[in-house]
Image: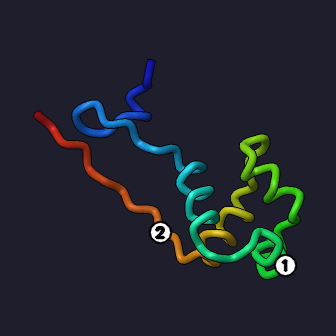
Amino acid sequence: MASEADTVGMGKKRAKMSDQIRAAIDSCGVTRYRISKETGIAESALSRFMAGERGLSMKALDVLADYLGLDVVMRRKRRP
């Protein structure tokens, strides 16, 4: 059963932030090796994150967000 934090609007499920970051990494057109070298994030840590085995530190997430040009957007919940 989906929790309130996992849903938006009329039953639409929202992708988890970590899944959105994984998708951004996959679609950026840069290899994980290059991302690792250019961000300083260990390739092993990035690989474990991409496999869903581990999370990343807030510092690493900040670096990735800057590198990928990501912003967090807050959407207001629609009320009936």
Q: Is residue 73 left or right of residue 70?
A: left
Q: Can you identify the residue that label 2 sits on? A: 71
> Which numbered circle lies on residue 27?
none
Q: Dot 1: what SS?
A: helix
Q: Are marks 2 and 1 in contact (CB under 8 Å)?
A: no
Query: Which residue position is annotated with label 1?
Result: 37
Q: Amino acid at mark 1?
A: Lys
Residue 35 at x, y percent in the picture = 75, 74
The amino acid sitting under disc 2 is Asp
The residue depicted at 74 percent of the width and 53 percent of the height is 56
Q: Nearer the viewer, mark 2 or mark 1?
A: 1
The image quarter containing residue 22 is bottom right
Q: Residue at x 22, y 33 (%)?
A: 10
Question: In the image, residue 65 lies at what x, y percent?
Answer: 60, 70
Above or below, comparing residue 2 to residue 12 in the picture: above
- Mark 2 or mark 1, earlier in chain: 1
Using residue 71 as the reference point, say whether residue 9 is left or right of it: left
